[in-house]
Amino acid sequence: MPRVAVIEGDGIGPEVTSAALRVLAHVCARYNIDDIELVKAPAGDTALRVYGSPLPEESWRAIRSSDAILKGPVGETAGEVVVRIRRGLDLYANIRPARCMPGIECLRPQIDLIVVRENTEDVYIRAEYLHGDVAIALRVISRRASERIARVAFTIARTRRKKVTIVHKANVMTVTDGLFRKVVREVGEREFPDVEIDEMYIDAAVMDVVRRPERFDVIVTTNLFGDILTDLAAYVSGSIGIAPSANLGDNKAMFEPVHGAAFDIAGKGIANPTAMILCTAWMLKWLGEKFNKKNYTEAGNAIERAIEKVLGEKKVLTPDLGGSATTQEFTTKIIENIQ
């Protein structure tokens, strides 16, 4: 029985998570899925206030014993929650697609790329030190982590346009980024000779994501650079409110929207749940593959089709997309279009 830990998060988190769970309940009934166990796992700013910890031990136990985590956005304690989960469960591959969805006004309509971000190393290991008036951060890049993220990127590229762009800053960080670039290229040339490889410095890459995103198919990069690139790519593709992401390990996965907690609109009932619902669809397809359950995959695909139809019709949209619908009205419209 697949077990899913649900983290509602902070700000608009409970609202968009509730919407996603409504959609999940509907597709489970429609596609005869009756064996998913959902377990709530409080985490984030609210958990810190209530339990004295942003990731209480009971929540951590629930997360560790689950196959997948469906996580809403977390506020100021995001680092303590997200980094611990990613590193604690070794969810080493952060996958973030960026493409122009139907009905969405995109900065660059031709954008269709995937950023594959190493998820467990770099400065995000949070090894920071204060020595007098000097602050020091440790950056870690290993051969092992670089090899396995490279394999993820090249494997994805084989299902697309067969091109991988290595993004780095090896001209300045010659040791750390030098190792990353070297190892990724070695893996590609040795194990994926059918996939084209090129590379760019991070400063050039952020410019090209904006001015000519069509040059990219799959981008593979380090943790910090990947964080920056994915938020930018989400903006270029129309809205960060529609961007899902997956954190994948060998046996477990966490699915979360790219956007933050948006405290300024929390409680107003106007949050856009698209990214969270897309995360739910992605989670179902991942579980379908993991447990060899075709109906899970069909349910996930049905959610994605419904979202594209609703967005394309442009009749029922939340305010951030130019409409006036509430979160619940938008969610209801998606449910109505699931076939």
Image: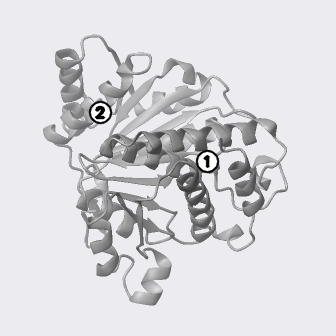
Q: Residue at x 63, y 50 (%)?
A: 274
Identify residue type, mark 2.
Val
x and y percentages locating residue 210 in the rendered image: 59, 30
Alpha-carbon span between mark 2 and mark 1: 24 Å
Residue on which the image places disc 1: 240
Camera-side residue: 197 or 248?
248
* Image position of 325 with respect to 250: above or below: below
Number of disc labels: 2
272 relative to 180 in the view: left or right: right
x and y percentages locating residue 212 in the rendered image: 58, 21
Tag of residue 152: 2
Considering only order in the chain, which callout, 1 or 2, is on the residue closer to the N terminus? 2
* Image position of 241 with respect to 74: above or below: above
Identify the residue at the far front of this view: 32
Q: Residue at x 25, y 58 (%)?
A: 89
131 relative to 17 in the view: left or right: left
Identify the residue at the far top of this view: 194
Q: Which is in the foreground here, disc 2 or disc 1?
A: 2
* Image position of 191 with respect to 206: above or below: above
x and y percentages locating residue 184 in the rendered image: 23, 27
127 relative to 96 in the view: left or right: left
Q: Residue at x 56, y 47 (%)?
A: 278
Identify residue type, mark 1.
Ile
Quarter of the picture holding the C terminus: top right
